[in-house]
Amino acid sequence: SLAFLSRNIHSTQISLALDCGAGIGRVSKEVLLKLFKRVSLLECTEEFLAVAKKTIEPEKVYKYHCKKIQQIEASQDELGVYDLVWFQWVLCYASDPELLQILKASKMFLRQGGY
């Protein structure tokens, strides 16, 4: 994942990523935070987010969302602010119609030129 992102994201403005299906925050910590200044984590299991809160430095996290990816929705302060919305090993839990809704909703998070 890190090699893929490093090869494909070329910007001096990469500061904020949204990790959807974040689990315990392993990808946020070991991949996304190597390229981005801060991350937000979206995860439906509260216990997993509790682990992430213990292992990721608080100043590196913009927001925590405890919800399913099918419930993804940008709040006013998150509209157009993310440089990347990242899904890893989680989209398989969505039906085809849900996937379309998820992708449309996630676009609202992205700043112009975001990935």
Image: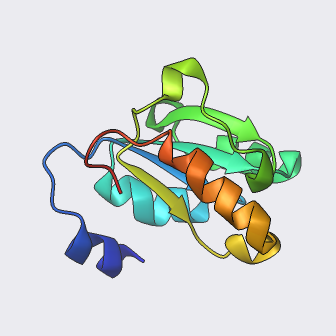
| Quarter of the rendering occupied by the C terminus | bottom left
Image point (15%, 53%), residue name: 11
| Left or right of residue 49: residue 45 | right
Question: Can see residue 45?
Answer: yes
Going 78% across and 43% down the picture, which residue do you hit? 50
Residue 36, compared with residue 7, is above or below; it is above
Image position, residue 36 (x, y; %): 33, 49
Number of numbered markers:
0
x and y percentages locating residue 44 in the rendered image: 82, 51
Q: Nearer the viewer, residue 55 or 28?
A: 28
Residue 105 image point, x, y percent: 61, 46
Judge whether 86 appears above or below 76 on screen: below
Q: Is residue 22 visible?
A: no
Quadrant where the N terminus is found in the figure: bottom left
Q: Residue at x 78, y 53 (%)?
A: 70
Colour pattern of the rendering? rainbow
> Quick check: 64 above or below 69?
above
Point 45% across, 37% down: residue: 60
Query: Please, is residue 43 above or below residue 91 in the view?
Result: above
Q: Nearer the viewer, residue 114 or 21?
A: 114
Give the x, y percent position of residue 80: 41, 33
- Horizontal arrangement in the rendering, residue 108 relative to residue 44 (left or right): left
Outermost top residue: 76
**Going by the image, does 60 lie left or right of 10?**
right
